[in-house]
Amino acid sequence: MREGTGVGAFNVIQLEHIEAVVTGAERAGRPVILQISENAVRYHGALGPTGLAALAAARAASVPVAVHLDHAESAELVAEAVELGLTSVMFDGARLPYRQNVAATAAAVTLCRSHGVSVEAELGEIGGKDGAHAPGVRTDPAEAHAFATATGVDALAVAVGSSHAMSTRDAKLDFGLIAELRAAVPVPLVLHGSSGVADEDLVRAVAAGISKVNIGTQLNRVFTRELRARLDAGPELVDPRKYFTPAREAVTEEVARLLRVLAGGGRT
Ligand code: G3H
Ligand code: ZN
């Protein structure tokens, strides 16, 4: 936020994603956020294995790497993440009525603050998660100011036109609203569903006031495209390392590329 650049926060599902994101950040010479969503925790049945792997990769990295719990709706999972050593969490109360969202988010802030863990929250539902689309919903600047002040959060996810899990990169962002939110909210703003946003619009979003840029689907797209090509070309392949290696490298390059795009969005 101080530099006027964006930091990439990439969703990781498995070890290869973790390795690719860290190596990509090192290649670009940029800090990065590894994030594990509650959905990814559900997929593995526990936070521990991927959480500890991400923390180990972060410690070994030559650039600053944060490990973040993404879209947690469960207060128990937030507590588990804090216990495990993650340094930030997103408490997602966007489905709750406003007053309940404030109360539950403030409780998460109280718990996390005592452990030096920062908290991101969401106001105004960003569509697309679990199939719930809410394309018309936008975060109101005055409400965002009141919410940030009442909860004490460290970062705020805002609904400004992006949507989760888009298969095309043509989301129409409201840059004017981002600028209004930037002026109204004292903490860094977070853009979710950024896989659906074109490179030039990512730059504009950062210039308008977004600091943390969440990207998941785009990495899955790159990983799966490479994997499918390798498997189609080599039906005899049985060793996962033969097709995971190029797929991981493709993700590494995409992470480095996106981090350079976000670094170029400075407001100097
Ligand atoms: O919290 C995660 C992000 O909002 C990722 O969204 O998969 O559409 O890029 P995406
Ligand atoms: Zn999200």
Image (cartoon, rainbow, N blue to C red):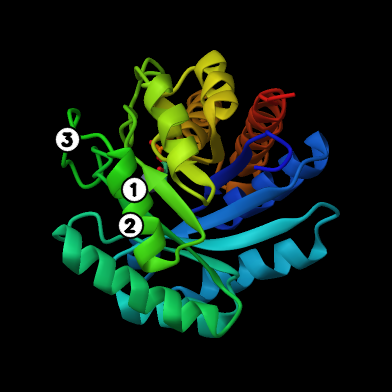
Residue drawn at point x = 17 percent, y = 28 percent: 136
Q: Is residue 174 left or right of residue 54?
A: left
Whether the residue under disc 2 has CB within 8 Å of ligand 2 = no
Q: In the image, what residue type sits under mark 3?
A: Ala
Residue under numbered circle 3:
134
Residue under numbered circle 2:
147
**Alpha carbon separation for disc pair 2 and 3:** 20 Å
Tag 1 and tag 2, C-beta contact below 8 Å: yes
Dot 2, how many residues are within 10 Å of its Cα: few (below 14), some (14-19), or many (20+)?
A: many
Q: Is residue 133 left or right of residue 235?
A: left
Residue under numbered circle 1:
144
Residue drawn at point x = 81 percent, y = 44 percent: 26
1 or 3: tag closer to the N-terminus: 3
Q: In the image, what residue type sits under mark 1?
A: Ala
Disc number lying in front (2 or 3): 2
> SS for tag 3?
loop
Tag 1 and tag 3, C-beta contact below 8 Å: no
For the N terminus, which image quadrant?
Answer: top right
2 or 3: tag closer to the N-terminus: 3
Provide residue 37's location: percent of width, then percent of height.
41, 58
Q: In the image, what residue type sits under mark 2?
A: Phe
Residue drawn at point x = 27 percent, y = 66 percent: 102
Whether the residue under disc 3 has CB within 8 Å of ligand 2 = no
Provide residue 15's location: percent of width, then percent of height.
59, 57
